[in-house]
Every structure is written in structure tokens, then in C-alpha cells.
Image (cartoon, rainbow, N blue to C red):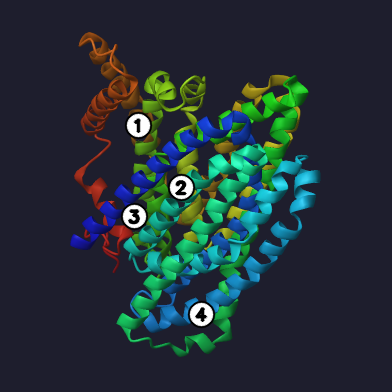
Amino acid sequence: MKKLVINASIIIVSSLLFNTAGIFFRVFLSNKIGTEGIGLYQLILSVYLMAILFVVNGINVAVTRLIAEEGGRASFSISRALIIRALSVSFLYSVPAFLFLYFGAEYIGLVWLDDVRAVFPLKLMAVGLPFAGVSACIKGYFYAVSKIIRPTAAQAAELTIQIFVIVKIIDYFMLGGPEYACAAIAVGMTIAEITSCLCILTFYRIERWLSGGGISKIYQKASILKKLFYISLPVSASSLIRSSLRALENIMIPIGFERYGYTNRSALEQYGKIQGMVMPVLMFPASVIIAFSSLLIPEVSEANALNQKKRVDYSVTRALQLTSIMSILISGVFAFFSDHLGPAIYEGTDCGYFMKVMAPLIPLIYLDIVVQELLKALNQQVSALMYSVTDAVARIVLIYYLLPEEGIFGLIFVLYFSNLFSLSLGTRRLLKITRLRLNVRDWAFKPVLSAAASGFIAVYLLDLTGMNPLPDVLYILAGVASMCFFYFFFLVWFGCLTRDDFKWFKILFNCPSPETPDK
């Protein structure tokens, strides 16, 4: 129980702190380089994500799953053998990604993005890719064995260095215009990636020293290399295809806005506002869910490998239930308080309006994240790849036809359709392989009613007590606190939450619930 409390606290606190820092830093950047600069940065970032997700995602999932399935959680010698093999596989992913991004930067900037200002930042970002691959292998090990504080510390070092470097150099770089402002961000990201790699390697060497440094003969088995490729290649291919299509989508959005009637600069500003300013805020609370979902992989993989169906069903059920309940609350918060939240974060913009319009997207996005992680844990990465490709193609087709006709509201419609479509495909597959049933009444209908009722009550009480003239930050804090209180009160009153619902966290930390033993 002590380990449970420590790990849960680390995940929740660190995720919230990192993402809070990220939001404040995003505000700092938007004030420095403007919405046009944010739009250019988002375009560059969409291409960079193609490379880094290809390098990182597959090998991270493969290490985490194999350590759980091959007994590495109980034996460091097995884990070490797997990591040695994984590092060689990571090299095969990171080198082509580096060559593509560094030597292809001019073609990408001039032909794909139609903006020469993207070339220099892309070359700088390419340098950090091999280091990201090494970090992914070691972090996969630490997540598999539930030693959360090591990757958390490495992430803290990465974020701190990134912000420090960018803040120190951006004013000097900005003298050259938006291109060099984005280059300053690229320099900070690359230095931070190298720092994170060195940090996580140091933690691993300490772990090796404490464990005696032995290595299992499993290292010599060709089947291990085959398993690493079998797991990592579909995930990496899925990441590459999905991020490539997403990059194409991001390139098409400003073009669609221009065809709608915006100027080139205004098109970048509108794109930067939605993708670079509003979406990061909507995704901010997802940090805790994303962190927990990374812990689902080793637990569900181990239970699935041992054919412990009850343990798998319990984990999947609780993950879907509590993700739905929490995401509906977060959606309600944005729906009721975005008029104050938008101006408090991005002064002088209409971001608050778009936060309100896009608030119902939140449950769809958050549930899709968890469903995708569960599919990977259950050896369904090929299905996840097919769904990703189908969803991305549908988005591109809709963007091509809708944006020139509807502008920014066409983009919002595409986001709604895409997330609902992707979630439907993933959930259908997940329910088919687990034979579970969704409890729509307790997981969706009653929580939506509870969120609506608690939001209206919170706003009414704030107006009744005369708190409306308060500064936005104080008004939001008071409103969210009262809304959360009434929301959970209604959930308990409706019977949506019981004491057993909070025991699911034990699953994530290798503590199976006593109510669902495997016999």
C-alpha cells in the first residue's frame, strides 16, 4: 500500500507540475513570437513528431511489454538482457529518422511546408533523435518495474533545461525573425533531450550497480530480437503513418484557411490559435490519464500473458470507467468556466470561446488515449495501426473539402468526427477481445447529468455570493472546487461510484484487487 501511495502521488503531482509549467511556457512563447510564430512552430513540430514518435513509441512499448511477459519485473538480469537487445533495435530506428530529418530538411521546408523558415529548426531538432531512442528503452524498463521516480526525474530535468535554454536565448534569436525564434526553441529541445538521456542512463547504471550487474542468457536467444521487432515495428509503423498523415493534415489546414479567404499570415494565426494554444490547454488535465495509461501496459500485458482473464477484465473495466467519469468532469469545467479561463491564460484572444465550443471533445480524446494503450497491452497493435490509418485518411479528406467552405468551424467539425470515429473503432475491438460490456448509464449518462447539475449550481452560488467581480483566477478556483464537490456528491448519490471503484489503482502497481482473484 505504501508503494501504491508513493507511485500514485509521484504520477499525479509530477504530471500536473510538468503540464502547468508547459502551459505557462506556451503562454510565454505566444507573447514572444505571436500567433503566427506559434503557427509556424506547430507546423515544424508536426514534422518533428513524425521522426521522434517513430523512434520512441515502438521500442518503449516493446521493452515495457517484454519485461513484463518474460519475467523481467522480478529479475534484473533478464531486464538487462532485454534492454541490450532493445538498444540495438532503437539504433535501427533512430539513425534513419535522423538522416531523414537532417538531410531532408530543405525538401520538407520548401516543398512540404512551403516555408523556408522551417529548414534550420528541423536540422537542429534532428540531433536529439538518437538520444530520444536510448531514453525510450530505459524509461520502458522503469515503467515496467513500477519505479516511476527515475523517468519522472529525467523528465523534470528535460523540461527545466528546455525552458531555461529557450528563455535565455530566444530574445537574441528573435532578431532574425520567426525562423530564428523557432530555431531557439529547437536548440532548447535538443539540449534538453540530450540531458534527459544522460540523466536516465545515470539512473540505470545505479540500478545495475545495486543489482549486481548480472545478465541473463536470454540475451543470446534470437527469439527475443524477433519479439522486439514483432511488438515495436507495428507500433513504430503506426506512429509513423499516423504522424505522417497528421503532418499532412496540419500542412493542409493553413492551406484550407487560405482557400477560405484568409491571408497567409492570418491562416497561420488561426491554425496556431487552435492547435498551438487551445488544444494544449484542453489536453492539460490529460497528463494524469496519459501517465497512468503508460502503467497499464506492463500490468495488462503480464495478466494477459498469464491468461489471467479476471485480472485483465478488472483493469480494463476500471480504466474505462474512471477515465470516462473524470473526463466528463473536466469537459464540464471547460464548458462552464472557459469564459474566464481563456482570458486568464491568453489575454486579448478569443481562445476562451473556442475552449467552450471544443469542451465536449475532451471525453472522446481522453478515452481514445486509454483505449489505444489497452489495445497495445493486449497485443492488438496491428489493429491499432489499421484504425489510426483509417482515421487519419478520413480527417484529411474532410479537411480538404470542408475547410475551404467552412473555415475554422469546418476544422472543429473534423475534430469532433475524427475523435468519435477513432474511439468507436478502438472500443469496438477492445470489447470484442475482452467480451466486456460498456455501462453507458453509470459511465456516461449519469456523469453528464451530474456535471451539468454541478456546473449550474457552482455558477449560481458564485453569482449568489457576489464572487463574479473577482479576478478570473480566483473565480475559476472557487468555481472548479465547488463544481468538483457537487459532481462527486451526485455520482455517489446516483450510485456511479462505490468504494470498490477506487481499488483499481492497485492493478496499476502490481497489487491485484482482492475482489477479483485469479484461480
Q: Amino acid at mark 4?
A: Ile
- Residue 140, located in which quarter of the rendered image? bottom left
Q: Between marks 1 and 3, how big is the CA–CA gap? A: 23 Å
Q: How far across and down, in percent of the image, does residue 45 sit? A: 61, 46
Q: Is residue 426 visible to the viewer in this orientation of the structure?
A: yes
Task: Name the quarter where the C terminus is drawn.
Answer: bottom left
Q: Amino acid at mark 3?
A: Tyr
Q: Looking at the image, which is closer to me, 352 or 243?
A: 352
Q: Which residue is mark 3?
A: 314
- Residue 37, located in which quarter of the rendered image? top right
Between tags 3 and 2, which lies in front? 2
Labels 3 and 2: the sequence-earlier one = 2
**Residue at x 62% of width, y 59% of height:** 54
**Residue at x 56% of width, y 35% of height:** 276
**Residue at x 31% of width, y 16% of height:** 456
Q: How far across and down, in percent of the image, does residue 208 sit? A: 37, 80
Q: Which residue is mark 1?
A: 329
Between tags 2 and 1, which lies in front? 2
Between tags 1 and 3, which lies in front? 1
Labels 4 and 1: the sequence-earlier one = 4
Q: Which residue is mark 2?
A: 163
Label 3 crowd bin: few (<14), some (14–19), many (20+), radius 10 Å: some
Q: How far across and down, in percent of the image, does residue 329 sit? A: 35, 31
